Image: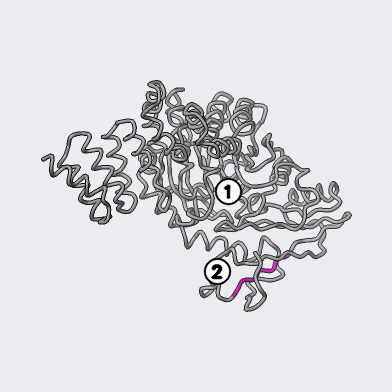
Amino acid sequence: MTNNEKDMVCLDSNRPFSKSAFWKIQGDYYLNLGISAWAQVPFYATSNLVIAKGYAFTIFKFLQEGLKNGIIDREEPVYLVELGAGQGKLTYHILNYLVPMLKEFNMEDVKYRHVMTDFATKNIEFWGSHHQIMSYVKKGYVDFAHYDATLNKGIHLIHQKITLNKGKCKNPIMVIANYFFDAIPHDVFEIESGKIKEGLVDLFTPQDNLDGQQVKDLNSVDVHFHFRDTKLPYYEDKTLNDVLSYYLERFDHSSILIPVGGIHCLNHLSSFSDGRLLLISGDKGYGSESAINNLPAPRVACQGSFSIMVNFPALSKYIELKDGFACQPDSQQGLKIFLMGMGLPAEKLKETLFTYKHCLSEFNSQEFLAIKNVIIKYADDVSLQDILATIRLSEWDPKIVMAFSNQLIEKIPNAGISFKEELSQNMGRIRQNHFHIPNQSSHIFEIGRLYYALGEFEEAIDCYKESLDSYSEDWGAHFNVGLSYYYLEKDDEALTHFKKALELSPDSDMVQEWIDKLKSDS
């Protein structure tokens, strides 16, 4: 993010990173755009079905093991707070796995409450209008809350009309923080030959990137770090100072990010349940201590919003110094998913830790996406069986199915019976896994095309009509509805949609030919 110095405006100068205007600029981005932010900000890596299944299994095992070992009281609610729930896709997928497991293992009476939080009111309004999320609200599994993680305030549940605050929760609180800690305040320090310096930040942007006091494009903000001498103790929090002392003793030269916003947030949330908290966090960040040695000043990335690398080892060290536990992922590449506990006995959670290791550490979303990318790259040359295996591995994710939709539709007519049967049997699952987000591609339209290729015309019509209801009017959807009705021998309905398709695409010879055909047949 570099710009010419001409007409540059200083947004902030010479301020500690965690206290700088950087974080207000970040917050304003989400407040102003609401759900539209997710047209720019990546989210698939932390909201797909593979990661949702791993989270659901880990949550379920914690509930089951907690009940067995006296950590959880069955008579009291168990709250999971999802920080920055955004568009809500992860919540929906987690519950699609978790609720059937609770029923299967006779745990329906466990008062599990999934609290979706965000500080952007527009996002909360979107959840309230989303029928897939609201279906779980009506069943009592989900509630909403407006929550700013930088403020030490209670969490007011909109539907239950109660407030979670200090000492309110009788059971340990669970927390999900995906792509969250990288977006709330951090401090940065420089360690050099036994001395420590605090990082200060200067922020500049071109004059024409401002609309009043609002920054229009975060990618046009220049972020410059410099350092000045400081000394310990730096924080009021003794454990935070101990973390800095730890790095000062071990590193000869490096810049160190400290996720103070995340640490303060976790301390605050743990106070709701007498210091007991289980965290699952997936984020871009450093996964091991060796990865944070000899680092230069932080690099700020921008994909719609700002993001920086989370120092998970520092967060882990903080929690361990407070007699908690931290489990790090096996892979050190890409997305990192950590499991951490505060005030919880690790020796009584062996099954939970085992589940995390096998569902989220050894193989998770990152590894799956790598496999998917290779298969897609060579999609024209791989067999239907290879494509089906990838889709199966994805947990029948519509996004993955759609990546192969053209190959599937082309090859379905000549596919074997067993292939068609397996795909047909799982089409309902694919459709259930579709989660509508405005301004995103219409997977439901492509699902309709697959139903059509399988000869399941009524299901195809349902999908095309859902696409028309959820997205803009489209001649192709009306045309495909018309074709489906034609093969169901419902010519009047077919003609109605062909005529609508022609209105939207008046130059289409193909649509006109079908209209002429139906008129001549009648």
Q: Is residue 191 left or right of residue 277?
A: right
Q: Quadrant of the N terminus?
A: bottom right
Q: Nearer the viewer, residue 264 or 83?
A: 83
Q: Position of residue 400 (x, y in %)?
A: 48, 38
Amino acid bearing label 2? Val
Q: Position of residue 190 (x, y in %)?
A: 79, 57
Label 2 and label 1: CA atoms lie apart by 22 Å
Q: Which residue is mark 1?
A: 179
Q: Nearer the viewer, residue 241 or 384?
A: 384
- Residue extending farthest to the bottom is 7
Instruction: Please tell me in which quadrant of the rendered image residue 337 appears.
Output: top right
Q: Position of residue 48 (x, y in %)?
A: 50, 40
7 vs 475: above or below: below
Q: Nearer the viewer, residue 192 or 229?
A: 192
Instruction: Please tell me in which quadrant of the rendered image residue 446 appears.
Output: top left
Q: Position of residue 374 (x, y in %)?
A: 58, 37
Magenta part mainly helix, strand or loop? strand
Residue 342 on the magenta span: no
- Residue extending farthest to the top is 418
Q: Which residues are magenta?
A: 200-206
111 vs 420: above or below: below
| Label 1 residue SS | loop
Q: Residues within 10 Å of mark 2 (few under 14, many from 20)?
A: many
103 vs 376: above or below: above
Q: Is residue 155 left or right of residue 205?
A: left
Q: Which residue is mark 2?
A: 215
Residue 327 in sight from this viewpoint: no
| Label 2 residue SS | strand
